[in-house]
Image (cartoon, helix red, strand yellow):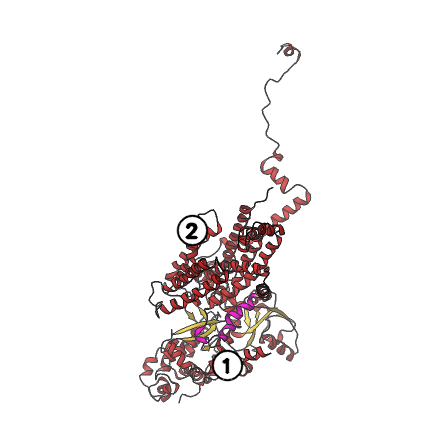
Amino acid sequence: MSDTHAQTVAFVRETQIPPAPPPASETGVVKWLRENLFSNAANSALTIVALAAIYMVLSNILPWVLNGVWTTSSLAECREVLQGKTGACFSVLTERWNQLLYGFKYPGDQYWRPNLALVLFLVAAAPVLFFDLPRKLLAFTAVYPFLAFWLIWGGTLMVPVVALLGFVAAAAVFQRFGKSSFAIGFFGAIAVALAVWLIGGELIPEGASEDAWLSPVPSRDLGGFMLNMMLGVTCVSLSLPLGIALALGRQSDMPLIKWICVIFIEFVRGVPLITLLFVASVMLAYFFPPESTVDLFLRVVIMITMFSAAYIAEVIRGGLAALPKGQYEAADSLGLDYPQAMRLIILPQALKISIPGIVNVAVGLFKDTTLVSVISMFDLVGMIRGPILASTEWNGVYWELLGFAALLFFVVCYGISQYSQWLERRLATDHH
Amino acid sequence: MKKSVILGAMTFAGLAAGAASAGTLDDVKARGKLNCGVTTGLVGFAAPNANGEWEGFDVAVCRAVAAAVLGDSNAVEFVPTTGKTRFTALASGEIDMLARNTTWTFSRDVDLKFEFVGVNYYDGQGFMVPKELGVSSAKELDGATVCIQTGTTTELNLADFFRSNNISYEPVPIETNAEAQQQYLAGACDVYTTDASGLAATRATFDDPAGHVILPEIISKEPLGPLVRHGDHEWGDVVRWSLNALIAAEELGITSANLNEMAAGTDNPEINRLLGTEGTLGEMLGLSADWAKNAIAAQGNYGEIFAKNIGEDTPVGLARGLNAQWTEGGLLYAPPFR
């Protein structure tokens, strides 16, 4: 450092200028607003129009929701309280929530049973949905359907136990003989299961359900959102394996199996669901004698399962078709037999491709369960359209009830959708 | 071809077997419960209340029959039916009787093989207009837009009425009553037409019921009544006379309040025969002697049932009109109990 400059130059800055804050238009909220909302004239105009639209919607809905009345016992009282102001009459939800959720005939002091079944369902579904969990939990999943049946329908514990024993016996037979010959194992398992059920059915004493610890609840008394959940869960979980079997059967080289699957899929897909439901509720009653009808819930489950299985089969067939032929040949060249090739190579890839389609069918199926209201089952929508809107207190309340139904369905369907996106990310094996 | 013959034969055999089985009356007694078909919900006529118990005008008929047959007005299994499932439910034997605001028509009686046992409500198609329209008669509705449910007899009745009066209208087709209420209130149509009882029930739910008038013209006949299957006349008689007992009770002045007093014996032989202190009417029906007393005790006589469920003091607010006793200018006329 020479000090000549100190004399020749008037001023030398010896310290750095303190950093100035960036211009207000280039930072924080303002910058974000400028870049995203007001970047040019057209966008600014669109932003203003959108804000006006949001304001209009909210200014109509918010007073309606915030002024809502929660404590009256009829629509007329609601109107008295509101004195002509805008406001929702949510009292219908507080007075009839139990009917909306459980139907109007499920005994009120037994609500803990479906509630417990729902909590246990979450436990049972967890190891299936999240495969990082310990595999031993699957044992509970296997027992769950029988447990849930006993909780919801009540009656004697013997019925689900006998049903479970039938499946256990069938699995044992299949384990024993299925290795050597698939046909013997398969049909032997069915025969053993039928035998167990028949003998077990005879052993259950008449009227055992009458004084059982859990009072029996007939299917006709189920209703509300509980019925939608039950139908949705049962039908999705049954139609997935059935759909996989149908998709594989349709690709089979054996003409008989192939054509059975093709005809089943094409026929069921070609008929509207509502027609199948009418067949379940109306036509089948003609074919059975009046005293020995199959339970209506079971008939509806069979019909909806058939319907969604046909759709899922086609979705999975799309996944199978998307696999390059090399994958099949690779499996063959490794010396794997058909079940091994399918289980280890083909299906994991095909199902991964099919996830969005399967979820689409599942969400659609869940919402389609509301169609049972047309065959006079009181699901959530049936409860609203029938008993609640037909009561003298609540006739005329539409938005509150249907909004509540929409909210419940949205929560479940959005949950399914979020899970499927997580699943797709978790299974992504391609490299970016 | 051959298959369809076999299927047809099976169906026929099934139907014949159903018809040949023991009488419905014996079935109901053996079961200890009456299976009664009702609507899935219609204001005032049938709907479960907040406790899940069915109540309403049609429900009262079911309860009266159950009380007459089984002595217990709660021994009823209510089977909700929709407009589409009601007839198959009855024909297949799933229900013993149908009390679901069903119009008695020729084809339902004859072609569908049912037996209407009587009429518990005389309805008819009417019109509702906003008061500010200043209309006092349906004949002044020239050029009006009319909300109407599609595919119903009301649609045909409407066309007939306007044509015979030589005036024009513009129909606004809609699917359900709920949709109709919203459309009418939103001003999509000047007039809403359906059964008069339905109009009254709908108007009762409005924010401002006084702002709407139901015009005096009734343009169709809609006799609503309970029905049973063809061919089982003993059971048909039980339902028919249970309904008649309710109607006769009102005519004879028997109410739920003085029932026990009357049943002890009166000077009027018809009351005594009806309540079983004289004669053997119950035995002839295959029921106990106090069958009619039980039926009336269930919910009161016809007039009490009407007043409690759909009468002028209820939100539905229907006047008796055609449904008054014949002695008071109505159409209710129970045949004599002797």
- Three-letter code for the amino acid on which mark 1 is drawn: Ala
Residue A20: numbered disc: none
State the residue in front, B323 or A15.
Answer: A15
Residue that lies at the very extreme toward the left in this rendered image: B264
Q: Position of residue A337 (x, y in %)?
A: 54, 54
- The residue beneath circle 1 is B13
Q: Is residue A278 magenta?
A: yes
Name the element at disc 1.
helix
Q: Chain of mark 1?
A: B
Q: CA distance from mark 2 to mark 1?
A: 52 Å
Query: Quadrant location of residue A167?
Result: bottom left
Count of numbered tags: 2
Determine crowd level at label 1: few under 14, some 14-19, many 20+ residues with C-alpha closer than 10 A: few
Query: Where, by quadrant of the figure, is residue B269 drawn?
Result: bottom left
Quadrant of image for the C terminus of chain A: top right
What is the secondary structure assignment of the residue under circle 2? helix
* Residue at figure coordinates x 58%, y 79% from the top left: B2
Residue A72 seen in the current view: no
- Is A413 above or below relative to B209? above
Location of mark 2 (residue): A137
Q: State the residue in front, B96 or B199.
A: B96
When the figure is inspected, residue B325 is found, relative to residue A385, above or below; the finding is below
Work out whether B62 lies above or below A317. Answer: below
Magenta span main SS: helix
Stretch in magenta: A273-293
Query: x, y percentage for residue B111?
Result: 55, 82
Residue lying at 46% horizontally and 53% vertically, measured from the top left: A125
As rendered, which of B170 and B237 lies closer to the eye? B237
Residue at the limit of the structure toward the right, as seen here = A41
Three-letter residue code for mark 2: Leu
* Chain of residue at mark 2: A
Image location of residue B79, percent across then percent down: 45, 72
